[in-house]
Amino acid sequence: MPDHFVDLRSDTVTRPTPRMRRAMAEAEVGDDVYGEDPTVNRLQELAAGLMRKEAALFMPSGSMANQTAVKVHTRPGDEVICEAQCHIYNIETGTMAAFSGVLPRPVPGTRGVLDPERVASAIRPASYYLPRTSLVAAENSHNLAGGTVMGVEASRAIGEVARKHGLASHLDGARIFNAAAALGVEAGALAEPFDSVMFCISKGLCAPVGSLLCGSPAFVDEARRIRKMLGGGMRQAGILAAAGLVALEEILPLLPEDHRRARVLAEHLAAAPGFEVDLATVQTNIVMTRVTDPLTAQRVGEGLKARGVLCHVLPPDHIRFVTHHDVDDEGLARVLEALAAGL
Ligand SMILES: *Cc1c(COP(=O)(O)O)cnc(C)c1O
């Protein structure tokens, strides 16, 4: 999109910073399929440490990382307990069924947070004629619930339930650093209860490409095999990993600014006629709003676009706004002006 738009469709639209581009240009590289890219190796080591895991693998995308985790943790015919609105089930083109041959067992959460008791009661008893429950997947922060966060205690409770029943657990932590910033905890504390975790460097952290899949050395060995199976083995990927190393240093500390701007926007929308916002769900950089009659989400989206603001319309009546590094206070002011101009 041209620069004159304020683009709040997603934090994936962020572009690499000048420092990232310099680091990319100067990155020391090797063939990562041989494990010989020093920059990829550095990013993987850093990621594993941050997530309190022993190993990590650089992946081309978050979806590939999540689906690789599902594949490693399951066998065909197994059932995967997941939050009903989660990304792994709803927004990854049915890959869990197509690639891993597993059944989703969606369990509704509260603002995206799974309840350990509901998870426990969704676990199948062992029987030769039932599907085998083998994995519990959680998401933090929760995208479709509006960027809501799951605290350390709640995360531990989910990990605990899984372990107690002999199931694997995976955390879709695409925006785990947003969750950590909102909660004032280390991301590792949110990742620790799960066997594996994925986080994206390509969203609010501004790197152009990539996600890190973290877990035990045995898990990562198997994940590397699956990544290769999917054609996700990359060669001189240090060019990309270099941006991730900068992202974790340069952009990560700035995430609270995105959260502050999301809050301002949410409060503005909540007070505006025609919009409904559950302010309790506005915890990170996502603002989910419902458009009320006689406005329609589609028309609001078009009206905002005509005034230079892009948002993500979720038919029939929801709109998502995501704040990020490339929208500063001036950009936010333009959004508020566009909303004030009437739709
Ligand atoms: C974006 C996202 C993903 C997938 O990441 P891609 O890199 O776009 O494939 C997974 N989970 C959540 C919660 C996301 O927001």
Image (cartoon, grey):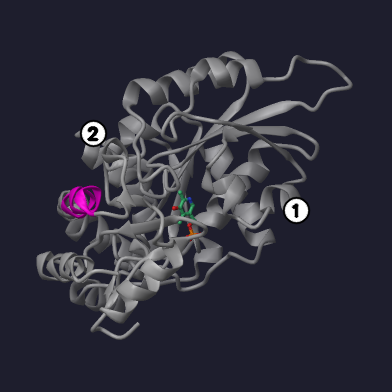
Q: Residue sitting at 24 percent across and 69 percent down?
A: 342
Residue 312 percent across, percent down from the top left: 41, 64
Q: Residue sitting at 26 percent across and 77 percent down?
A: 21
Residue most extreme to the front: 294
Occupied quadrant, residue 103: top right
Rendered view: 133 above or below 241? above
Q: Magenta residues, as a range?
A: 264-272
Q: Is residue 38 visible?
A: no
Residue type of the residue flagged with mark 2? Leu
Q: How many angstroms separate mark 1 from mark 2 (CA)?
A: 36 Å
Q: Residue sitting at 23 percent across and 39 percent down?
A: 182
Mark 2 Cα-neighbour bin, 10 Å: few <14, some 14–19, many ≥20 = some
Q: Is residue 206 magenta?
A: no
Residue beneath disc 2? 183
Disc 1 element: helix
Residue type of the residue flagged with mark 1? Ala
Mark toward the start of the polypeptide (1 vs 2): 1
Disc 2 element: helix
Residue beneath disc 1? 98
Residue 174 percent across, percent down from the top left: 41, 49
Q: Residue sitting at 59 percent across and 49 percent down?
A: 90
The C terminus is located in which quarter?
Answer: bottom left
Q: Is residue 266 magenta?
A: yes
Residue most extreme to the right: 129
User: Relative to residue 170, is residue 181 drawn left or right?
Assistant: left
User: Relative to residue 239, is residue 184 drawn left or right?
Assistant: left
The N terminus is located in which quarter?
Answer: bottom left
**Residue 329's disc number:** none
